[in-house]
Amino acid sequence: MSKSNIAKPSLTITLKKYAYSLFLVSGAIPFISFWLSETNMLTENLAPYFAVVFFFGVIPVLDWLLGRDSMNVPKELMDTVSNQAFYKWLTLLTVPIMFAVMALGLYQVTAPTLTLTGQIGWILNIGIVSGVLAINVAHELVHKNSKFERFCGGLLLSLVCYGGFKVEHVRGHHVNVSTPEDPSSADYNQSIYHFLPRAWRHNITNAWKLESVRLKRKELSPWSLKNELFIWYGFSLLWAILALVFFGWIGLVFFLAQSFVAFTLLEIINYVEHYGLRRKKLDNGKYEYVTHHHSWNSNFFLTNILLIHLQRHSDHHAFPKRRYQVLQHHEDSPQLPAGYAAMTLLTLIPPLWKKVMNPIIDQYYK
């Protein structure tokens, strides 16, 4: 390979490297909402809804305008790019940002002049940001070998009362993905409204089952303090108590409600990522290995930057330990017709969802 052929992708990778900083824009949205209220550009009861407009109005339009990005990091550069500390510390910066976001939300939702409309707005505002930023980065971190990164991932999940995801996602979902044994992999023709209650319940109950099995192998009780779920749910309880003590009952309701919005958004994305896709069952009763054919892929540039390549979900399931910056695009993976923001809206109207998605699945399996 010539020097020119190596230099060109390296320059592109460097430019994209710093473009990833844009994913922290999500953490700025609540502060922009606050500024819009303080400058009277929007009333204090309408300002928090800026997050809804931004993520589900502006982003889909910009996705369409900016188009797709199919650039892959060359194989000979994957180790180099994977080991650059910039990418790791960029994700870890999310932790203090999310605590600041949560503090702002608590401060705003308890403002004496705010009406119920404004309070609901702030629940949605912080809940969406928690789902887009906190949970997404947590998803990246819980897969890593570093204990510190995994701890930070659990800490972010504790801010949305969904600590079980750290256990169930890695040891449950990734094992059973795209099979009937995984309620987080939506069936063909299953609506989002049938999917969500099963996904919520499964995430909580299966996390406990998986931890019980792990502890049993070590001859420990599930009620042992070695059960890591006690850590993450313990942190969630701590945050809830602090919200109650410093911001009253409104603060507690806000913390729990934004958590519900955040982990519901997570499960909607789970629905999008695996809808209708199935691994074949082999003659020995086991399922075929997970490949990049068992998750939906979406390559719209902006959403992939904001979600640190979560939309390259096909490669993530094929290689769960890969860091976000080196996840690969596969042309032969099933491809979504839009980015996650637009697809999330589409799920809310099941007949329209099926009309768009089912023909794509049918054609893919032909």
Image: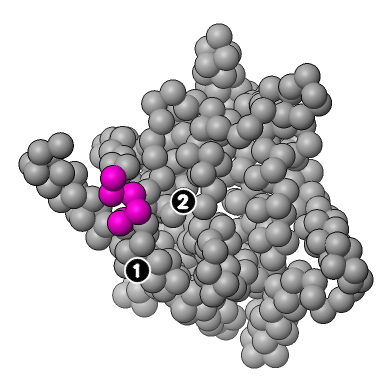
In the rendered structure, which amino acid carries the disc numbered 1? Ala
Q: Position of residue 164 (x, y in %)?
A: 72, 61
The reply to whether the magenta stretch includes residue 218 is: no
Please tell me which residue is depicted at 61% across the width and 34% down the height of the picture.
290
Residue 322 disc label: 2
Instruction: Give the left or right position of residue 356, taking residue 187 as reference.
Output: left
Magenta segment, prevailing SS (helix, strand or loop): helix
Check the image and report above or below for 139 versus 8: below
When asked about the image quadrant of residue 31, the answer is bottom left
The segment highlighted magenta reads 76-81
In the rendered structure, which amino acid carries the disc numbered 2? Arg
Please tell me which residue is depicted at 10% across the width and 38% down the height of the picture.
2
How many circles with numbers are drawn on the protein? Answer: 2
Cα distance between the residues tagged 1 and 2: 14 Å
Secondary structure under the numbered disc 2 in the rendered image: loop
When asked about the image quadrant of residue 154, the answer is bottom right
Please tell me which residue is depicted at 46% across the width and 51% down the height of the picture.
322
Furthest residue in direction front, as rendered = 1
Residue 85 disc label: 1
Check the image and report above or below for 179 versus 196: above
Please tell me which residue is depicted at 50% across the width and 67% down the height of the picture.
45
Instruction: Give the left or right position of residue 168, taking residue 70 as reference.
Output: right
Query: Which residue is nearer to you in this view: 366 or 109?
Result: 366
Q: Position of residue 24 (x, y in %)?
A: 37, 64
Furthest residue in direction top, as rendered = 366
Q: Crowding at label 1, few (<14), some or many (≥20) Cα neighbours within 10 Å?
A: few
Q: Position of residue 76 (x, y in %)?
A: 28, 45
Secondary structure under the numbered disc 1 in the rendered image: helix
The quadrant in which the C terminus is found is top right
